[in-house]
Amino acid sequence: MKKLSSLSIFFPCFNEERNIPFFIDEALNFLPKIADKFEIIIINDGSVDDTRLVTDKLTKENPLIKVIHHSENLGYGAALRTGFSVAKYEWVFFTDGDLQFKLSQLKKFIPYTDKNHVIIGYRKNRADGKARVFNAWLFKLYIDLLFRVGVKDIDCAFKLFHRKTLQSLHLESTGAFTSSEVLYKLKKKGEVFVQLPVDHKKRKYGSPTGNNLKVIIKAGIEALSLYLKIKLGSLVQK
């Protein structure tokens, strides 16, 4: 099986103390199979449980594991931006630290890296419940109306990028819209997305935050703000 020369993988985490040891163990066992060199980065976005204690202990035990602590909860997008900025290897992958995706699914992404810079997953069957699925459908519709990104599952947290595609992006959002902003700006740069199906399972430990009304409203406002900025900018240029 083809291996990547180097891979940075990061996990945005908020109150995931019980999940972290499991996904770190999974990563340490799986990543040597797909990458010659790798680093594992945990982005602790201001957790108020024992995430800091758990992650600090793990970093002392293994030099391949790093943790970045946000002093307060800055939002999912801020965690993504931190992960993108600190990742040092050729390929950058992120997924959530809630164990809803089996990391080994990343192996089917690897063959596409010969000719593509952006390989993203879409959930074959969402395991979030009807309300979350409906909200996600509305959000995707909203984003496509504004930006016409045109992917199957815009907020699926299972994405692999060549690092050079991320280096020139100027990201502005800090909430749940950030993943969509990344795809929109990459599409504007002419990047072609490979979209692959991934399995999705129910969360075992902890509580999700993506269906929080404040999170949804913030994402909607940030998306509209970027859209208006682009439109106003185009009017000024004319």
Image: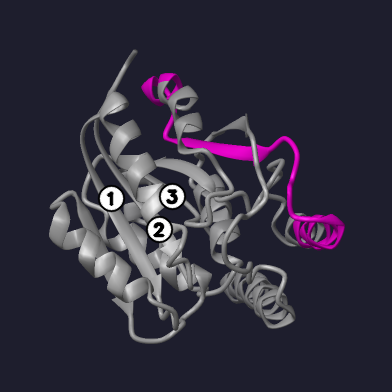
Mark 1 or 2, nearer chain start? 2
Front residue of 92/104: it is 104
Tell which of 149 and 140 is nearer to you.
140
Queried whether the magenta region covers residue 121, the answer comes back as: yes
Q: Give the residue type that dot 2 points to.
A: Ile
| Badge nearest the viewer, 3 or 1 | 1
Label drawn at residue 207: none
Residue 20 position within the rendered picture, expressed as x and y whole percent measured from the top left: 40, 58
Q: Answer whether residue 157 is magenta in the image.
A: no
Q: Which of marks 2 and 3 is nearer the N terminus?
A: 2
Residue at mark 1: 40
Secondary element at image label 2: helix
Tell me the residue that label 2 is attached to.
Answer: 20
Residue 35 seen in the figure: yes
Question: Is 46 on the left or on the right of 215, as rendered?
Answer: left
Q: Mark 3 points at which residue?
A: 94
Find out whether the residues at labels 1 and 2 contact each other: C-beta distance under 8 Å.
Answer: no
Residue 61 rendering spot, x and y as whole percentages = 15, 56
The quarter in which the N terminus is drawn is top left
**How are the colours assigned in the image?**
one colour
Helix or strand or loop: what does disc 3 sit on? strand
User: How far apart in space, not on screen, are marks 2 and 3 (Cα)?
Assistant: 14 Å
Local packing at callout 3 (Cα closer than 10 Å; few below 14, some 14-19, many 20+) is: many
